[in-house]
Image (cartoon, rainbow, N blue to C red):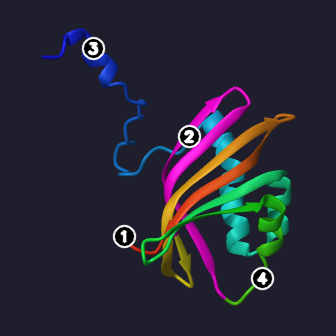
């Protein structure tokens, strides 16, 4: 039998604010968490606009993009791209892109932060792939910037 004094250690959970009455949605981030979400949401807007140049002021050019890809056949591959390559590769095209991030966890400690959450990626309104996003950010001169983006990507097991 486990000693009772150990129970609080095993039950440590990041506290979550209660849902606002009547909305059924988690509360919008406030304060520092809201500031951290500014470049994250702007990244999704740049993807939707298919304009990599919109990303330049939001991210460090020495950052990286890491993709943990799981193919339909079950094979796994890690892809690393410099952030500047991500900027250059996001160009206008006929398809409409949309990425939705669900209930992100936002952690801040001084001038570093991360945002982690499940996402779905849609092309022309159709679910294309899903996974988890991890943005790590740094605050420079009072402004949050994306330092790196890592995400998992798969086409199987996605739900809306």
Locate residue 71, reporting x and y percent.
Answer: 49, 74
Which label number is shown at residue 106? 2
The image quadrant of residue 49 is: bottom right
Give residue 92's mark.
4
> What span is colored magenta in the figure?
95-120
Residue ranking furthest to the left:
1
Circle 4 sits in a helix, a strand or a loop, which is it? Answer: loop
- Residue 74 is tagged as none
| Quadrant containing the C terminus in the rendered view | bottom left
Q: CA gap, disc 1 to disc 3?
A: 37 Å
Marks 3 and 4, how far apart at CA = 56 Å
Q: Nearer the viewer, residue 69 or 121?
A: 69
- Residue farthest toward the bottom in the current orientation of the protein: 94
Vertical side of 74 occupied by 149: above or below: above
Whether residue 13 appears in this view of the structure is yes
The residue shown at (64%, 49%) is 135
- From the image, tell me which residue sits under label 1: 157
Q: Is residue 60 visible?
A: no
Q: Of marks 1 and 3, which one's residue comes earlier in the chain?
A: 3
């Amino acid at each position: 039998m486990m000693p009772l004094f150990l129970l609080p250690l095993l039950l440590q959970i990041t506290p979550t604010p209660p849902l606002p009455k009547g909305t059924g949605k988690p509360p919008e981030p406030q304060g520092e968490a809201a500031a951290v979400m500014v470049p994250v949401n702007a990244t999704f807007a740049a993807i939707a606009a298919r304009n990599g140049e919109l990303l330049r002021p939001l991210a460090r050019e020495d950052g990286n993009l890491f993709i943990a890809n799981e193919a339909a056949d079950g094979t796994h591959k890690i892809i690393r791209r410099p952030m500047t390559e991500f900027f250059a590769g996001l160009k206008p095209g006929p398809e409409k892109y949309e990425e939705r991030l669900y209930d992100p966890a936002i952690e801040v400690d001084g001038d570093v932060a991360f945002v982690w959450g499940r996402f779905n990626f849609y092309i022309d309104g159709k679910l294309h792939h899903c996974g988890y996003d991890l943005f790590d950010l740094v605050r420079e001169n009072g402004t949050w910037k994306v330092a790196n983006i890592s995400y998992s990507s798969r086409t199987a097991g996605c739900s809306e």
